[in-house]
């Protein structure tokens, strides 16, 4: 049997697997992406990209093609949350931002980027068995030309919620499947429906149908603000006891969404000309461990969330956390336990996301007077700016702060690095530009010769940059490749205290000095 060898096997060529492939190439690793489908999956899934991953893609210099394809960058002025709408229109800088883009097009762009960086992507290749020992992992693969094996240092399952690799690795995936079917469509309304000036609809036999969510005893209906002559997005949720067995791979039809709308509203809503039709169920599940020896899980293979608008963000952020750590292991400089921090940090992030998405279930599924009262109280609370910002940051995943060693208790340690405008001897730059190469950076903001000298033993594993910035948040920042801050010097911290802290942080994350 033919045997191939690579550094990392990635199972699944969805957004998570393709993002991981690109990040691994930046880390100097050879990935091989194996996708069981011969052609790209055309059943519509996600319809946009939003949250912290948008900033991360900008930090990688990879956002512009996605912005061009999406038609621009849009603050999410109104965002669905558990059957109600969060209104960010009064905020100058909304905490949740999004770009409308079909998942199939996003996958095309991510595949182009991964390929340009040198990643190998093979379609029509199904992983049917996985085994591992102390030195390597072996995947048994069924391809168009027959069966073969691939050996690698590590294998990462990015093969979705029904992950075969996760099952083969013995990683449990307990949780809940909610007994409801959700249907989404982008359609036009026929002439018998009047689009009112405020974007509501006047529907024969029903009256005025307001933009946003309409709840009946038979389910939930929602649509976006309508514009005469333009398509609108419509959404229904109905309880169906067979939801856990529903074949979500079977394409949805126009008649199916029409029938669902009629059941929920009790009248016909004449819709036509569909440009997107999709059906999905909600689950709340999380892998009990993100690593089993040399097999790791990411994206939907690691977690399933019972709400829209968060899965892509969480899955792609998993890969950014994982890739540089795999690179360190494969290149031989990783400190002890570095790869285990992938589970520690991203399992924590997944659990946080489960909290707010399960809270949305409670808001969405309640049908009695108490549930109505809960929704009323919630909407009144999020009308206040601090509450709106807090909930928005939950959705975006921008409130994640990893529990990292923090000797001086600096508020930025563990957080995503702010995009500071920087002035250097070579000109102006920014934190985002410095992160394009996905390398660790010591950012010296006070021209401290003592700090730079302390870090020189880690060259060329890290980069040292001296710069000035307005309103500096720290005297120095040690930024990991995933753009999270590993250590920060407090303002005017004496070098005698800062130097040993910096050296300890460098050794903790980037191994012994060279």
Image (tube, helix red, strand yellow):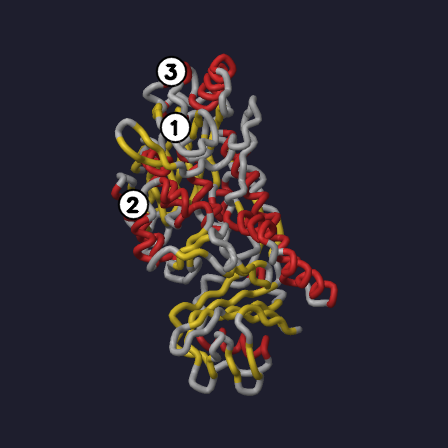
Residue neighbourhood size for the residue with mark 3, other residues' Cα within 10 Å, grouped as few (<14), some (14–19), many (≥20): few
Are circles 3 and 2 on residues that touch, CB within 8 Å? no
User: Mark 1 or mark 3, which has the lower sequence index?
Assistant: 1
| Residue 238 % position (x, y) | 59, 69
Of the residues tagged 3 and 2, which is closer to the observer?
Answer: 3
Q: Is residue 106 above or below residue 213?
A: above
- Which numbered disc covers residue 113? 2
Q: How far apart are marks 3 and 2 (CA)?
A: 38 Å
Are circles 2 and 1 on residues that touch, CB within 8 Å? no
- Which numbered disc covers residue 449? 3
| Residue 422 % position (x, y) | 35, 33
Q: What element carries label 3?
A: helix
Q: What element carries label 2?
A: helix
Work out whether residue 131 can be spotted. no
* Quadrant location, the N terminus: top left
Residue at left 56%, top 47%?
A: 353
| Residue 172 % position (x, y) | 58, 42
Residue neighbourhood size for the residue with mark 2, other residues' Cα within 10 Å, grouped as few (<14), some (14–19), many (≥20): some
- Which numbered disc covers residue 440? 1
- Residue closest to the eye, 491 or 248: 491
Q: In this view, does 409 lie above or below 421?
A: above
Q: Is mark 1 on a helix, strand or loop?
A: loop
């Amino acid at each position: 049997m033919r045997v191939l060898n690579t550094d990392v096997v990635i199972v699944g060529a969805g957004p998570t697997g393709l993002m991981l492939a690109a990040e691994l190439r930046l880390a100097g690793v050879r990935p091989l992406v194996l996708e069981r489908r011969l052609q790209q999956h055309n059943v519509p899934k996600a319809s946009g990209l939003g949250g912290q991953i948008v900033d991360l893609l900008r930090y990688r210099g990879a956002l512009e093609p996605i912005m061009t394809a999406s038609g621009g960058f849009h603050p999410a002025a109104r965002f669905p949350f558990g059957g109600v709408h969060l209104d960010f229109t009064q905020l100058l800088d909304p905490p949740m931002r999004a770009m409308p883009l079909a998942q199939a097009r996003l996958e095309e762009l991510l595949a182009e980027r991964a390929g340009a960086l040198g990643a190998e992507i093979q379609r029509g290749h199904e992983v049917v068995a996985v085994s591992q020992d102390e030195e390597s992992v072996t995947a048994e693969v069924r391809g168009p030309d027959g069966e073969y094996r691939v050996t690698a240092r590590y294998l990462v399952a990015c093969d979705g919620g029904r992950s075969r690799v996760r099952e083969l690795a013995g990683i449990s995936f307990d949780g809940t499947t909610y007994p409801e079917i959700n249907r989404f469509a982008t359609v036009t309304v026929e002439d018998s429906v009047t689009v009112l000036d405020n974007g509501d609809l006047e529907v024969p036999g029903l009256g005025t149908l307001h933009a946003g969510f309409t709840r009946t005893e038979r389910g939930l209906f929602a649509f976006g603000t309508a514009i005469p002559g333009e398509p609108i997005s419509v959404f229904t949720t109905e309880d169906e006891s067979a939801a856990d067995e529903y074949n979500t791979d079977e394409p949805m039809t126009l008649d199916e969404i029409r029938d669902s709308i009629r059941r929920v509203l009790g009248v016909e809503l004449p819709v036509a000309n569909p440009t997107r039709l999709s059906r999905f169920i909600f689950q709340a599940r999380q892998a009990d461990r993100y690593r089993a020896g040399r097999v790791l899980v990411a994206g939907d293979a690691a977690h399933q969330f019972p709400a829209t608008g968060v899965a892509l963000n969480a899955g792609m952020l998993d890969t950014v956390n994982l890739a540089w750590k795999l690179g360190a292991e494969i290149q031989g400089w990783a400190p002890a336990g570095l790869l285990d921090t992938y589970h520690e940090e991203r399992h924590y992030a997944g659990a946080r996301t489960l909290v707010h998405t399960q809270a949305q279930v409670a808001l969405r599924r309640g049908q009695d007077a108490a549930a109505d009262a809960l929704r009323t109280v919630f909407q009144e609370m999020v009308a206040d700016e601090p509450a709106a910002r807090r909930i928005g940051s939950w959705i975006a995943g921008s409130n994640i702060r990893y529990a990292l060693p923090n000797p001086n208790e600096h508020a930025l340690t563990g957080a995503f690095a702010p995009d500071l405008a920087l002035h250097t001897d070579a000109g102006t730059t920014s934190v985002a530009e410095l992160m394009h190469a996905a390398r660790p950076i010591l950012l010296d903001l006070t021209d401290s010769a003592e700090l730079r000298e302390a870090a020189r033993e880690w060259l060329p594993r890290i980069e040292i940059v001296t710069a000035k910035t307005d309103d500096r948040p720290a005297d120095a920042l040690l930024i990991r490749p995933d753009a999270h801050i590993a250590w920060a010097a407090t303002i005017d911290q004496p070098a005698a205290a800062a130097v040993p802290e910096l050296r300890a942080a460098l050794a903790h994350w980037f191994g012994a000095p060279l």
